[in-house]
Amino acid sequence: MAPTSLRRPPPAIGRGAAKPIGRGRGAAKPTPSPPQPAPPPVSALEDDDDDDDDERFPTDLEDPYDPEKPNDYQQFCLERLQRENAERLKAELEAAEKKREEVRLEREKAERENALSPAADLSGDEVYRRRMMMSQGGAGTGGEDITGDEAYKRRLAMSQGGAAREDISGDEAYRRRAALSAAEPDDGLTPVARRMMSKMGWTEGAGLSLFKPPGRHSRLTDSCSLMFLCDHVMPPPGLGRHGQGMVAPIELKKTGGNAGVIVNLPQLPPSTPKRAAPPLTSRVVLLQNLVGPGEVDEQLEGETKEECAKYGEVRRVVVHQRKGTSPEESVRVFVEYFRPESAIKARVALDGRFFGGRSVRAQLYDESMSLSVVATAPLGTDRQHTKMTTPSRAEKICCLGAGYVGGPTMCVIAKKCPECKVTVADPFADKIAQWHDPDHLPIFEPGLAELVRETIGKNLFFTTDLEAAIQEADIIFVAVGTPTKTVGIGSGHAANLCYLESAARMIARVATTPKIIVEKSTVPVRNAETLMRIFTTNPESARLFQVVNNPEFLAEGTAIPDLLRPDRVLIGGQTTPAGHEAVRRLADVYAHWVPRERIITTNLWSSECSKLVANAFLAQRISSINSISELCEATGADVDEVARAIGMDSRIGAKFLKTSVGFGGSCFQKDILNLVYLASSLGLQQVADYWEQVITINQHQKARFTERIVHSMFHTIAGKKIAILGFAFKKDTGDTRETPALDIMYKLLEEGANMAVYDPKVPDELLWDDLTHGPSLAPKNARPLPLRERITHVTDPYQAMEGAHAIIICTEWDEFKTYDYQRIYNGMVKPAFIFDGRNLLDHQRLFDMGFEVHSLGRRPLTHFPQGL
Ligand SMILES: NC(=O)C1=CN([C@@H]2O[C@H](COP(=O)(O)OP(=O)(O)OC[C@H]3O[C@@H](n4cnc5c(N)ncnc54)[C@H](O)[C@@H]3O)[C@@H](O)[C@H]2O)C=CC1
Ligand SMILES: O=C(O)[C@H]1O[C@H](OP(=O)(O)OP(=O)(O)OC[C@H]2O[C@@H](n3ccc(=O)[nH]c3=O)[C@H](O)[C@@H]2O)[C@H](O)[C@@H](O)[C@@H]1O
């Protein structure tokens, strides 16, 4: 709903004043005008007109509207990865620190061993001094000549942290050292040994135990105390953090003086190789537990490649099997990407996901490790095939609105997400009953019936019980109509949001568990704010809801292929952690069949805006080429040739350049009007005027086509029979919303024509319903037109054309191209006119048969003598 500030009088269409549209479109169809559920009371709808409202609602709703801060899910994932990497880095640093400590200890040990030989009889302080030199590099302080006391001071400083920085004199150091050694028990160990053990984690009476084997001598010199330590330390069960190290004391046999040899070098248990921490960035992802042992076959590689290509171009996949490891780690699948970003995306997306019941572990793998080595490892011989399915949690999905969008979209989700339960809820029992009968679905869409047959009763359900469906769902799509308002403020331009609001109010009232609410309907920019306000009215339940916008881009007639292979899926969410999570969960649903790189995410307002703009751009192309069609007719150029020539420019592209009698459908007009209203309300009048021209040209195209019919047929069509081929707004649909055929028929009716209409898919009651209400933007006729007397609806096209003066092609149905036009010509009144409003037929052939051929964007083909 437009914010308060946007509530201004709507702009006028074209030159005239704002015209109210005929009736609300976009509601339940094609069943004729079923009543929409009662919208909430006006007082409720007007609620947000109150300026005070802003104080009652959370102000942070404004925050996400910052185009500088796109809510990008990948961005979120990268940030999360960076966080994880930082943590990993920290762990690595700690591990490195530990390692340094170990090295230091080993070095100390080596030094001590050296010290056993008379040539290297160094004091502990001297050892420390040398160690300092080594660890600090030759150049720095290592070269400085420090005394033993100074060395002790530093060592103390190291072990005591900050406090050790206290400035103690050499005497004081000596005094402390003496006190320390005096305090040490006479256990046969020297202070150095004690210090060493302390550094290894020993505290008296805990952890490692010290004991003095009976009968051994009690005191050795400092220099051999380390050996003595080994002799005397018998830690149960072994040295090391996990007790994995030395388990028996080393026995030393003195060979004289301070020298000795080890007589029982223990057999240490083989050490388990340390797992290297995964690298921070890499082009290789290692997948583990994707399949188990014995589940590897030759398809695994290909399937993995296909699945992983969702995150970027895969260079190769290598499957490696290992023996002697856990089942989870026995099959390693390495996926090498061309770009590290792809690998990072894959890791984020796949780690922890379920494939065929297994929780996959995905981690980046050090690129420097040769994959060729693992590539040559033999594959398993077991041919059991494990089908890879895209991972996701088993969401319970519901859709409010079983129309052109809700029905097909949910069928595809049900088909592609077999683990999800999908329920479509609509208050109209007739419509729901029709959805249960695949042979008589409420809408015609190629491929839809097969999908319904496949999924209904398995994981796809249709119901009128809206509340139960809402209650049960995790994700609720709202795909109700948002037609142009016909009365009140913004009438003729603004979207009527009462169905959306009543759906939201029901959700807010019924839901007791967390829900992701998906705005599937096409809405004005910032509509999600209205929904959030409805949901936050009750603070207790506010936290249950996350609103995301997920506009639908399917076109009728190609809805199923459009849904199965969309150019992109757009998801807009709030820029909060919960918002990101909601976007992720919805993205996971689509990721069952849509490559990840085609699932794009943004903030709520950009997403809402993108849908309106997409439709505006598409419609603009049609109006552009239609405007050129008039120019071509006046100049002798051929509009289809022009479209072909410009369409080959890759910057322009070939699609949506087919001239026509005007675009129809429930959305182009309403969405542009919506955009115009929004721009105008924001004071952007030039923007509003610019886009309004798209509608103006569309109206003009329909009008001029009809005028041409009348003028060509000797300026009168009163009492003449005219065959109308096609009433749907485009081929392959039974939908008639905003069909240009209706505008044309109304004009012809006003001129007194008789008409026979044929359309392969439009039901009779829908045709009469449309005719009764008339075109939405046409002025309402005060005098009721004699519809039934002058119009017949036929089911045989030849019957429509028999005895006709003219044929008008209004819809581009393929079957129209297959008719026997010679037979048709023979049965028509001469001169036989054909007006091809879609440039569908072979005009030259028709002309050769004797037809007077009028098309769009071309000079007419006429047998009449010219220039008389
Ligand atoms: N038709 C199309 O090709 C496309 C339509 N859209 C947008 O999708 C939305 C829906 O369009 P259509 O499916 O064509 O409309 P539709 O009129 O075919 O279906 C809407 C359905 O919502 C039901 N409904 C109304 N209030 C309800 C409520 N409170 N709870 C549950 N159901 C309720 C109606 O009974 C009707 O069956 C519109 O906003 C439209 O602009 C977007 C893309 C394509
Ligand atoms: O929001 C919507 O409702 C949908 O609107 C259109 O889909 P739709 O109206 O079903 O069908 P289109 O194929 O776009 O055709 C619209 C009208 O334009 C006409 N048209 C289309 C293409 C063209 O080159 N010339 C032309 O006159 C068609 O005949 C039809 O009357 C968009 O194509 C969809 O992406 C969008 O989701």
Image: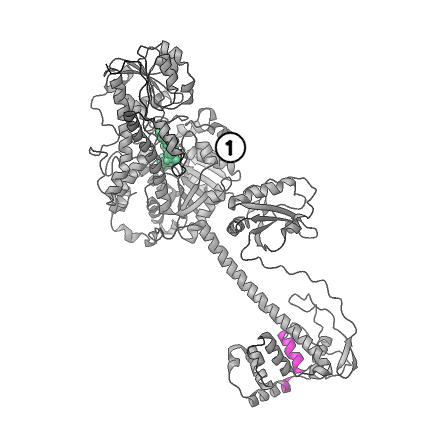
Tell me which image quadrant ligand 2 sits in. Answer: top left
Per the image, label 1 sits on a secondary structure element best described as helix
> Between 544 and 82, which is closer to the camera in this rendering?
82
Q: Is residue 401 magenta?
A: no
Q: Locate residue 123, reporting x and y percent.
A: 66, 84
- Residue beneath disc 1: 455
- Residue 744 lies in quadrant: top left
> Between 474 and 367, which is closer to the camera in this rendering?
367
Q: Say above or below: 730 vs 617.
A: above
Q: Quadrant of the C terminus?
A: top left
> Between 683 and 767, which is closer to the camera in this rendering?
683
Query: Could you tell me if residue 276 is visible in this image?
Result: yes
Residue at the location (51% across, 35% down)? Answer: 415
Q: Quadrant of the N terminus?
A: top left
Q: Locate residue 346, reporting x and y percent.
A: 53, 49
Q: Say above or below: 319 vs 401.
A: below
Q: Locate residue 51, reporting x and y percent.
A: 24, 50
Q: Locate residue 842, reporting x and y percent.
A: 39, 19
Q: Say above or below: 522 vs 218.
A: above
What amino acid type is highlighted by mark number 1? Answer: Thr
Part of the protein shown in magenta: 181-205
